[in-house]
Image (spheres, rainbow, N blue to C red):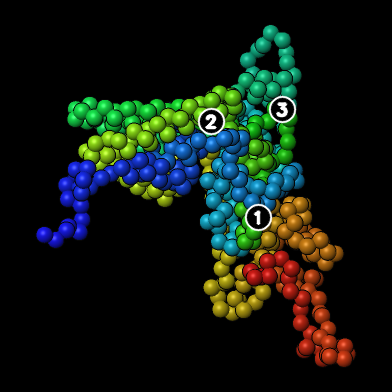
Amino acid sequence: MASNWFPVGTDNGKGWRLDIVSLLAVIGESSMEAHSQALTSSWTCILPRIIPAPQALLKPSRPTRMPQVPSKVVGVHNGTTVPTLNYFPNIIHPIDQQPPLSFVVFKITHKEKTPVDSLPSTANTNPSKGNSTSTSVDRGDLEKGPPIKRRSTFKEQLEQKFTTTSPPHIPTRTYSPLSVLSVVSCLLTVGLLIWAFLIPDGTAVLALGTISLASSIVGYASWWSPVLTKRNFSAIVPPGDVVIRTREGAFILVQCNENVARELYTGTEECDYNVSTQIYRFLVGLGTFLLMVSVVLLGNCNFTMQAAIGVSYIVLNGAFWAISLLKKDKFWDLSAYEVEDITPEDAKNAYKDSADTSEAATFEGKASFTRTMWYAIRETKRIGWVKKSGAAPTTPQWDEWLTLAEQEAQKGNRGWNAVQQREKIVGQLDPVTRDDATPVDNAEQHVPAVEVLLPATR
């Protein structure tokens, strides 16, 4: 009788065996690491359940800040420079989705204005679009209000209202995909426990119990909340507009007040954990021990429960992988901010050559770093941020061009030939030499110097 090519049945001899099911419990670490911060920021992280690769949460230390993206962030009016872009603004306007040499303008405000947010702006944010005008603050008008026993100063009133508010906080969405999946996995675990009781399979009951307890302990140890930076003083300051320059030559202008700028761009996004570091280490150690015990128990369950638990882990791994394809704004509640795209029509296609063939052959008709930078200068009407961010070389020729660009921007000359003027002022003629080092006098042999910044995208 010929031997069978494949196992037959589920006995311990020549049948199918699923001892490897314990390996399925620790597969999918990459997906869990991608979701670890959003997953542990919700209260659903403490639900007892089976989760793929729980060891992804067993870290010797916890991050103190949210992940950041390398990028130049410069304040237009205050000159504050930050070398990285924070986590949440990168969700609002992902810089990796900005085409090279593109230019966009966003206006970000609080949906519910705080007392300091309601103060009039002290400078124009975008005069060309008529969004705001320069106004002066009347202290008498700001001090009007219900009578009080002791007349407090303007500064005391604002500081009292501002300091009594809680620190800015961005929670996870109530019905985010990760929260829903956590609840579903908890119900799935309860169903597996009931099934193990009915079979009965005591080993499966212990395995599911220990691994669920381990996930709850580790989830509670990692439970945290993102806290943004807020201003401690309420002095009237210029607008907090910022310009973000990517390595690919894209510019993002954000028009906002100082409170929004401090919360999203110039401040730090800290992680506020519910337990101390010492307690965290103890809980992680306990969770590691329970995880090792559960892996041993999973390999000793009967065939039915091994098959059920194995299929559950495969489904959960697929679900976490599918969720990783969603945008990050599906997980975080950013409803406290109102974002509006106010990019001018004549700058929306900064990364494209002009559709007009005749114009595309000119300096201004071709997409270039200089043209995109001019669009940003044209909207901000300032060049201090250009020098702070290192967007232009520090040479006398470039300083001359920047000064001229600032003057034209303040005049409202939106059609200024910025690239052509750059070629005249910054471009230099380099003599081409022969082998005997004799300069060539023919002017046609002279070639303009190549722009230093972003030579591949000029």
Residue tagged 3: 233
Q: Position of residue 250 (x, y in %)?
A: 62, 59
If you read the primary sequence from the N terminus, does the residue marked by circle 1 or circle 3 appear first? 3
Label 1 close to label 3 by CB (< 8 Å): no
What whole-number distance in Å separates the C-alpha atoms at marks 1 and 3? 29 Å
Q: Residue pushed farthest top?
A: 149
Viewport quadrant of the C terminus: bottom right
Helix or strand or loop: what does disc 1 sit on?
strand
Q: Position of residue 266 (x, y in %)?
A: 67, 41
Residue visible at 84% across and 90% down in the picture: 435
Please state the total of marks drawn on the protein image: 3
Helix or strand or loop: what does disc 3 sit on?
loop
In the drawing, what numbered circle is on residue 245?
Answer: 1
If you read the primary sequence from the N terminus, does the residue marked by circle 2 or circle 1 appear first? 2
Nearer to us in this view, 362 or 273: 273
Q: Nearer the viewer, mark 3 or mark 2?
A: 2
Residue visible at 49% across and 36% down in the picture: 57
**In the rendered structure, which amino acid carries the disc numbered 2?**
Ser
Q: How many residues crowd mark 1 within 10 Å: few (<14), some (14–19), many (20+)?
A: many
Q: How many residues crowd mark 3 within 10 Å: few (<14), some (14–19), many (20+)?
A: some
